Image: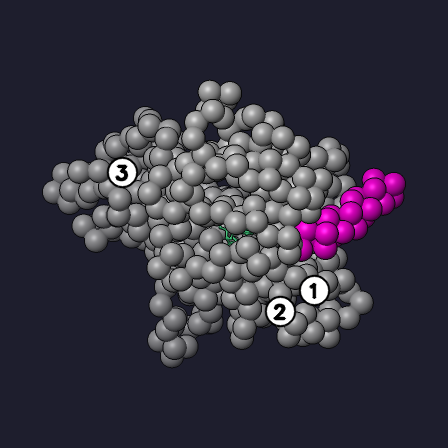
Amino acid sequence: ARAVASLPGKEYKLEAETELRIEVRSVSDAKVILLQGKAEIFGCELVSDKVVDMRKRTTCAVFTWHGCTIKIIPESVYAYVSDKTPMQFYVNLHEALEQRRCKAVENNTDGPVTMVIGPTDVGKSTLCRLLLNYAVRLGRLPTFIDLDVGQGIVSIPGTIGALHINRTITVSDGLDDYPSLVFHYGSNTPSTNVKLYMTLVSRLADSLRKYWANLPSRCHNGCIINTCGWITDVGYKIIVDAAETFKVDQIIVLDNERLYNDLMIHFGSNAEIVLAPKSGGVIERAQSTRANARALRIKTYFYGDDNSGYTPHVYELAFSDIQIFKVGGPNLPTSCLPLGMKPEDAALKLINVVPEKSLIHRILAVSAALSTDEDIVQTAVIGFVCVYDVDVNRKILKVLSPSPGALPRHILILSDLSFYDIPS
Ligand code: ATP
């Protein structure tokens, strides 16, 4: 680290309660080093002289409570200092949560259930990270629930899940090796199949309560729930339903007074609603940037990060050894449905998929279910493969997988999401 610290870069001296906002653009990765003082990135403390790697096309802020000196390598990386941060507000939120955790320990009850909501690009995921990291620094082990199927951080897009946090989350952390529970939804917006989305949210909430019931030492730590940025019309209804399903006791609304007001009226005294400011450092992302971020997330799942040198495995699966399903059929009018079947039942229907060339590039989730006697729709998934080729004549499916050898399970669920960056 000392050798790296002597490389040419740019030094920034930060006053107390300011942050250095760093934007690594597409050319190459960057390195951040704390030379003096104390600093943190989204609640994760930096270690003096230790290099923090930042990947290209990422942004972050190095915040200091008491002042520090930071070096960034290379010098050309875009960065600026800001003294207008909402950190004091956020740390107060953390302190209030900690008081509730202490009360939960005292009374032997479940800890605080907090949901972070707001429009897109207001820093929801970042605030979740910060609150989780501050909790871990006090020795708490909270659960992180990610309901964001578009830009979530627990697993690849198109999923929702829970992550049992057991150490601080660093800026370069992929979060892949935390104990997690992931459910496959299959699209990057809840609007594609609202019924399926809500069914999975409810399943996840049940699993969390069961997990806490079985591990009482964990339940006092509470959980932080991240949500999608869709907050109008059906999006609003989904958020309210999800908050009720998880029995949240606090909702943090980032930067939207109208939403704050609507929720105050809706929840009354049943939940505390807090309006929080957004940070001026949060990057607004165009649709194309969001799509790229999703693709990068999937690529990282298969290839690791750019520096890992990891390549996925490609192997063949006989059609006869696997079963592929898709969840949800077309919404047929009642007159076209079998007697007694309601139209919304189609949303959770398991439909058999016959492998064909059109599946190339599509993501398949590997279900934890051992047989179709189980409720496949509501069973967690244990990983993902990407269809590399389909040989209809030989009846063989070639897939890309992060782990070697045969598939641990044989039931696969087709996602709407595709991954195109496949090696030739
Ligand atoms: P989405 O609507 O996509 O879920 P979000 O509201 O969860 O977005 P984040 O993902 O938390 O927003 O933040 C968007 C981007 O802004 C992230 O790349 C994050 O690293 C960056 N960011 C957040 N806070 C800061 C800050 N203070 N300085 C610089 N960058 C920041």
- Vertically, is 167 above or below 413? above
* Between 284 and 330, the one nearer to me in the picture: 284
Frontmost of labels 2 and 3 is 2
Q: Is residue 279 left or right of residue 302?
A: right
Q: Is residue 245 left or right of residue 285?
A: right
Dot 3 corresponds to which residue? 399
Q: Residues within 10 Å of mark 2 (few under 14, many from 20)?
A: some
Dot 2 corresponds to which residue? 256
Q: Are marks 2 and 3 in contact (CB under 8 Å)?
A: no
Residue at position x 53%, y 32% in the image: 33
- Indicate the amino acid at tag 3: Val
Q: CA distance from mark 3 to mark 1?
A: 46 Å
- Element at label 1: strand
- Indicate the amino acid at tag 1: Leu
Residue 352 in the image: state x and y as whole percent: 32, 53
Magenta stretch bounds: 86-108
Q: Earlier in the sequence, mark 1 or mark 2?
A: 2
Residue 372 in the image: state x and y as whole percent: 42, 45
Q: Earlier in the sequence, mark 2 or mark 3?
A: 2
Q: Quadrant of the C terminus?
A: top left
Tag of residue 382: none
Residue at position x 69%, y 44% in the image: 16
